[in-house]
Image (cartoon, grey):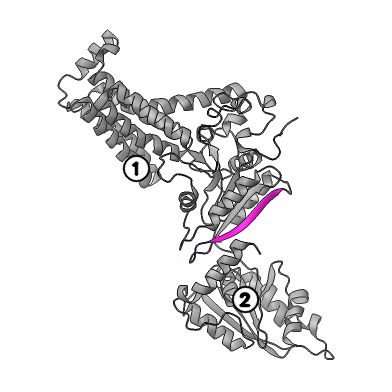
Amino acid sequence: MNKWVWSQKKKRQIHFSQQQTNMVSSEEFFSSSLNSNLEQLQMILGNNPDFAIRKFYIDVFNVNAAIVFIKGLVDIEQIYEQILKSIMLDLDKHGNNDNKEWNSGSIINEINKHVVTLTDVKEVKEIEDGLMDILSGDTALFIDGCDTALLLGTKQWPSRQIEEPITEATVRGSREGFVENFLVNISLIRRRIKDANLMFEKYTIGRRSKTTVILTYMKDITNETLIKEVKKRLDQIDIDQVPESGIIEQLIEDDIYSPFPQILTTERPDKVATSLLEGRIAIVIDGTPFVLLLPITIKSILQGPEDYYERWFVGTLLRLMRFGAVIVSLFAPSLYVALVSYHPGLIPTDLVISIAGSREGVPFPSIAEALMMEVTIEILREAGVRLPKPIGQTVGIVGGLVIGEAAVSAGLVSPMMVIVVALTAVSSFALPQYGVGIAIRILRFGMMLTAAILGLYGIIMFAMVISIHLVKLKSFGVDYTSPLVPYSFSDWKDAIVRFPTKSLTQRPDMFKPKDSKRMD
């Protein structure tokens, strides 16, 4: 048993009576009395409508027994066919031996080895361990006179069917997306990597939620130092509940004050499989379809799966368009504000005359125009997300057109400002990662304010601050600006420009994989 599991186990034992508010006894182990065990569980769980106890009598052993389970988390048909029916009706075929003396240990052993046909069966003596399994969907079998409970794997809870990812639509590639069931998710990964070196390590995080977290990596590829660092950060998490992968992401990231994401989220199994084979680590959390990938770099957040599925020049073109979209989304409004307010001489004469004519009658300075339109766009974007999907799309499109046209007609903003804001919004939609888009939107407002105060000098200074921050930023020990800074020629083959697949023979050197070669 590793050190973290031991410490967590001791911690749970210490706080066990505090966490279970209905618990009135400090017993840690099951007793040999059936009624005492049932009463103990009843006191812990209370009179909840989903808590079920089914008592019965085993005629062959002349002993009372009971099963305990949570309705809605178990397969009732499986309980009847493979537990109750096997024990109450079919047991005499296996254990009816008048010359044999049965004791509690032999009864449990007989049922475990010769009666129950379930594949997932284990014996537990501690109340907390048994309670956690029951609350996870297992069925506990108690025999009168035995201080051991038999935990039978009967999990079956409602789960969404595998569908196409909503947040990562692609033209070419797999249509399968992760769901909220971690067992389904790791099976989707296993289907794509049929290798014995693919490791899944289970963690239970959340003092009350007891959320299952799966650490996934390739044993013969992923750097050992990276694995130890991720395990260390997961071990240090002490929180009541883990409702979504975003909580884990915030608790283990390097810099909590950085606007840039340091961990990638994805709904695509093919993307996870590719990342694992590059030497990264994936974290699968039960209850969410979003899987975490780490470490990442600035190029990781601007890549899409179709970059590799299409031919190399198509993938390169798509990647260059995304980089261009980032630049437009970040700099376009601030450049407009700086040029109009401070540097009109840098604008071509015909264009500056056109802009001056369109701004005639506008009562606000350019920064007020920009902020007004950007805030409006952000509100429309948020409204479109929160509303039902068909209505949200309508609100986003119609609202933008109506408000933009009305603002121009009322003389509140210039037509050129509407064009700049619209181009900025469209460019932000081209980014493949939602978290990156949020970061760019935040920085855009800061850059507009510095442009309004200092003009182009403000833009340059703000860009320098962003660059310095990116160079200093790390993701689990990996430089965020890799392979640009520090320079790595081998990784440049898959950076801004994607070289042909035949030339991508090495795994990314920035992740320091154990096995650096992926193609002969």
| Residue where numbered disc 2 is placed | 140
| Residue where numbered disc 1 is placed | 382
Residue 120 rendering spot, x and y as whole percentages = 69, 67
Quadrant assignment, res 53: bottom right
The correct choice, above or below, for 163 with respect to 459 in the image is: below
Quadrant assignment, res 202: bottom right
Q: Would you say residue 439 sits in the magenta stretch?
A: no
Residue 349 rendering spot, x and y as whole percentages = 26, 8
Residue 127 rendering spot, x and y as whole percentages = 58, 77
Q: Disc 1 marks which amino acid? A: Glu
Quadrant assignment, res 338: top left
State the SS at label 2.
Answer: strand
Crowding near the residue tagged with mark 2, few <14, some 14–19, many ≥20 C-alpha atoms within 10 Å: many
Crowding near the residue tagged with mark 1, few <14, some 14–19, many ≥20 C-alpha atoms within 10 Å: few
Residue 502 rendering spot, x and y as whole percentages = 69, 25
Which range is magenta? Answer: 197-210
| 86 to the left or right of 293 | right
